[in-house]
Image (spheres, rainbow, N blue to C red):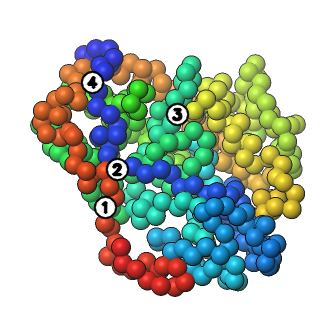
Amino acid sequence: MPSVTHDDDDAPLLADLMPWSAAPPRLGRGWPTAPDAASLRARWDALMKAEGPEREALFGVTRSRTPHSAVAQLPGQASGTGRLARESGPCAEPVRVLHSPFDEQWLIPDHRLIDAARPELWRVADERQLFVVEQTVVPESAGPVLLISSVLPLSAGRGGRVRPLYRRPGGLEPNLAPGLLDHLRTRLGHSPEPVDVLAWTVATARAGRAGPAVPLTADLELWAHGVELGRRMLWLMRRDGERPKLPGGRRPYVRSPLPAVPVDVHYDRDEEALHLDEGRISPVPPEAWDFEVGGVRVLEQWFAARTEPPEPGTLEAIRPATWPQTWTSELLEIVTVLALLAELRPQRAELSVSEPITGTELRKAGVLPVPDGARRPASVLDHHEEGPEGQFALI
């Protein structure tokens, strides 16, 4: 396969190829998220039982939200819009979100609990959507530049801007520079789908001074190889559909039962074993244990989110009394995903771009710069959304 080194400084920026972005939702308080949905319902019930100053203290007042804040309903979610100070209804049904890299948790989708919800992202979040999450690059760390999620990512850790693949629900209007797909079709002699562009992007994106850069190619053979590699990365990161498995003999299993309340995790490289106190999972490849995003080890962060002692008397203190079996299943799956992603690093490193399509070429073709409207969210509503105190507004 023809290739050249891809040190071309004229590679297009992700910010130009996928021009619409938003900051991820920022909660402002930790208790509306949890690794299990039952804890969220119990926390809500505890909040509803509290009154006056006690409810305010449990809620966690910030400059953006108090129990007296008047806010609209989150798009697509059935939650109340009355002042939380006098709310007595049931908890909104928890939804899955990306809490931190490779850690899907649950969230109470109630706008009254969220400091900065980013409604424009909720409006386009559906089963067709894919979210690109930029990651802070740490020197000497082999972590990915981009993460892909099927569920809405929250502001946590070192995550940066969120770029949806589609600007409208139902997989409509790709969030790509106008004219980019036509230009690629002309140069490749092939009509790529929006998800093909995303697959190529996640396989080739690299850190740059002005943000992630995406070297493009007019080499159809190289493009097909990069898209195939990227599609496997998408499948592993999305965590939906058929579950990935390591080959027999390399699949991690629980070798010694996990304790009811593990408090410590450590890794034995000689045994390739992950120890949760006296519990043991193996084999766990070193590449899975060492997998970092933004300079933070994924497995350690995942474990800490479930075991760090909460402050007594807070809503965060309402949590499972013992380690649920579902967490063990999730842990085994994350180990598998990280190991399989790590195996793709050599192939990504060899994916050097020949026949580059540069930023200069895209500017000459009129693809860049993108129009200002492409950097703003689309007007996607054809129905009413409930505003504060039950009012309705069409946006």
Using the numbered discs, state the Cα–Cα distance from disc 3 to disc 1 in whole angstroms. 27 Å
Within 10 angstroms of label 3, few (less than 14), some, or many (20 or more) residues? many
Q: At label 4, which amino acid type do we have?
A: Asp
Mark 3 or mark 2: name the one nearer the start of the chain. Answer: 2
SS label for mark 3: loop
Q: At label 2, which amino acid type do we have?
A: Trp
SS label for mark 4: loop
Q: At label 3, which amino acid type do we have?
A: Thr
Within 10 angstroms of label 1, few (less than 14), some, or many (20 or more) residues? some
**Residue 10 location in percent, x, y?**
27, 24
Residue that numbered label 4 is attached to: 10
Mark 1 or mark 4: name the one nearer the start of the chain. Answer: 4
Question: Which residue corresponds to the image point at 33% horizontal and 17% vertical from the top-left?
Answer: 7
SS label for mark 1: loop
Using the numbered discs, state the Cα–Cα distance from disc 2 to disc 4 in whole angstroms. 21 Å
Using the numbered discs, state the Cα–Cα distance from disc 3 to disc 4 in whole angstroms. 21 Å
Mark 3 or mark 1: name the one nearer the start of the chain. Answer: 3
| Residue 302 visible to the viewer | yes
Residue that numbered label 3 is attached to: 136
Using the numbered discs, state the Cα–Cα distance from disc 3 to disc 2 in whole angstroms. 19 Å
> Where, quadrant-wise, is the N terminus in this rendering?
top left
Question: Which residue corresponds to the image point at 22% horizontal and 24% vertical from the top-left?
Answer: 356
Q: How many marks?
A: 4
Residue that numbered label 1 is attached to: 378
